[in-house]
């Protein structure tokens, strides 16, 4: 077994345990870990498995934001590079939702290459989730707004990975058709 495989499985295990009681917002209420593994798989597949830190970041990208995990905890468990990547894509939950969304659009252009790739994968997974299992109670307008917001976030990430961008574009097209966006 390679060290990379050990690190990757540790990250998957940690992410699953941290998010154990969480479900996706969609009607099917899938385990939240499904989103994390989809993001990691998108990153692994579209980079041909060339960046372990990025794939681990995909698994762990919501731990600081949505669990009791800290940057220090991630640094101790997974190293400075993984912790820094997760911190870079973490929203400040003390801010109102609309402010967090605005900041994502504004700050993504100056983020690292890895953070931008992770943003594309995250938004791709989220759009796929909206199409396959829209959250109960979300209006058509809210669904359309999410599609447009995801497009705005990803706009500044273009030109880094054609395969990942194609996956986003496919998810965006399906969402536009589904929600008349």
Image (cartoon, grey):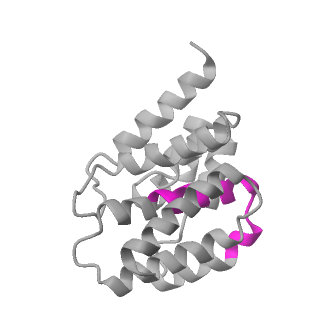
Percent of width and height locating residue 110: 76, 69
Pick the front one: 150 or 173: 173
Q: Determine whether 64 is above or below 79 in the image.
A: below
- The residue shown at (50%, 36%) is 11
Q: Is residue 100 visible?
A: no
Let me know if residue 122 is in the magenta part. yes
What residue range appears in magenta? 107-125
The image quadrant where one finds the N terminus is: top right
Let me know if residue 153 is in the magenta part. no
**The image quarter in which residue 78 lies:** top right
Q: Main secondary structure of the magenta part?
A: helix
Tally the numbered discs. Answer: 0
In the rendered view, does 30 fall on the left or right side of 53? left
Pick the front one: 60 or 68: 60
Pick the front one: 176 or 151: 176
Percent of width and height locating residue 32: 34, 51
């Amino acid at each position: 077994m390679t060290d990379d495989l050990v690190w990757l499985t540790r990250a998957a295990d940690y992410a699953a345990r941290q998010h154990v009681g969480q479900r996706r917002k969609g009607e099917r209420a899938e385990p939240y870990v499904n989103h994390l593994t989809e993001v990691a798989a998108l990153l692994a597949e579209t980079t041909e498995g060339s960046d372990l830190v990025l794939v681990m970041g995909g698994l762990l990208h919501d731990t600081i934001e949505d669990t009791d995990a800290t940057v220090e905890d991630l640094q101790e468990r997974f190293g400075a590079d993984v912790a820094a990547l997760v911190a870079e894509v973490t929203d400040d939950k003390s801010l109102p939702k609309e402010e967090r969304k605005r900041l994502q659009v504004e700050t993504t252009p100056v983020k690292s290459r890895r953070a931008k790739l992770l943003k594309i994968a995250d938004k791709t997974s989220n759009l796929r989730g909206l199409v396959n299992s829209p959250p109960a109670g979300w209006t058509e307008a809210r669904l359309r707004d999410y599609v447009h917001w995801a497009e705005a976030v990803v706009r500044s990430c273009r030109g880094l990975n054609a395969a990942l961008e194609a996956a986003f574009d496919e998810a965006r097209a399906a969402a536009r058709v589904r929600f008349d966006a």
